[in-house]
Image (spheres, rainbow, N blue to C red):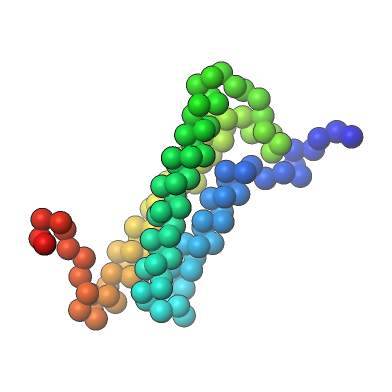
Amino acid sequence: MANNTTNYINRELSWLEFNQRVLDEAHDPEIPLLERLKFLAITSSNLDEFFMVRVGGLHLLQASGNKKADPSGMTPRETLDAVSLRAHQMMVEQYKCLLEEIEPPLAAAGFQRVNPQEL
């Protein structure tokens, strides 16, 4: 039986889409504001771990000269390129969510983010 790569989704890109669903919760105005902030923090923490573990592993594979495609048909280099693009999109969305959707109502309620130098 031939392996059809269209039947598979790249593992790393699938994980990023899971994290996108968590980020989507941060946008939901039906969810209490501090819970939305928590979802935003979770996506940030998830991305940190993702880059340390999975992207680090992809870099090792690529540095070793591995050009073998995964079940989805993507090589380590192709996966790194796709992950870079998708993660960048997510980080832009995270900042926009924080600055435009979460911080303004928090500020209106008397909460403000401060820099460490201001403490």
Residue 98 is left or right of residue 118, and the answer is right
Which quadrant would the C terminus be assigned to in this image? bottom left
Query: How many marks can you see?
Result: 0
Quarter of image, res 97: bottom left
Judged from this view, the residue extending furthest toward the right is: 1
Q: Position of residue 57 (x, y in %)?
A: 52, 33
Judged from this view, the residue extending furthest toward the left is: 118
Q: Position of residue 42 (x, y in %)?
A: 43, 60
Q: Residue at x 55, y 26 (%)?
A: 61
Residue 51 is left or right of residue 6, and the answer is left
Does any portion of residue 85 appear in the rendered image?
Answer: no
Does any portion of residue 72 appear in the rendered image?
Answer: yes
Q: In terms of depth relative to the viewer, which is nearer, 106 or 34?
A: 34
Residue 82 is left or right of residue 45, and the answer is right
Q: Residue at x 45, y 41 (%)?
A: 51
Q: Residue at x 15, y 56 (%)?
A: 116
Which quadrant would the N terminus be assigned to in this image? top right
Quarter of image, res 52: top left
Q: Residue at x 45, y 52 (%)?
A: 46
In this rendering, is residue 27 above or below 115?
below
In this rendering, is residue 60 above or below 5?
above
Q: Position of residue 93 (x, y in %)?
A: 41, 57
In this rendering, is residue 104 above or below 55?
below
Residue 86 is left or right of residue 13, and the answer is left
Judged from this view, the residue extending furthest toward the top is: 65
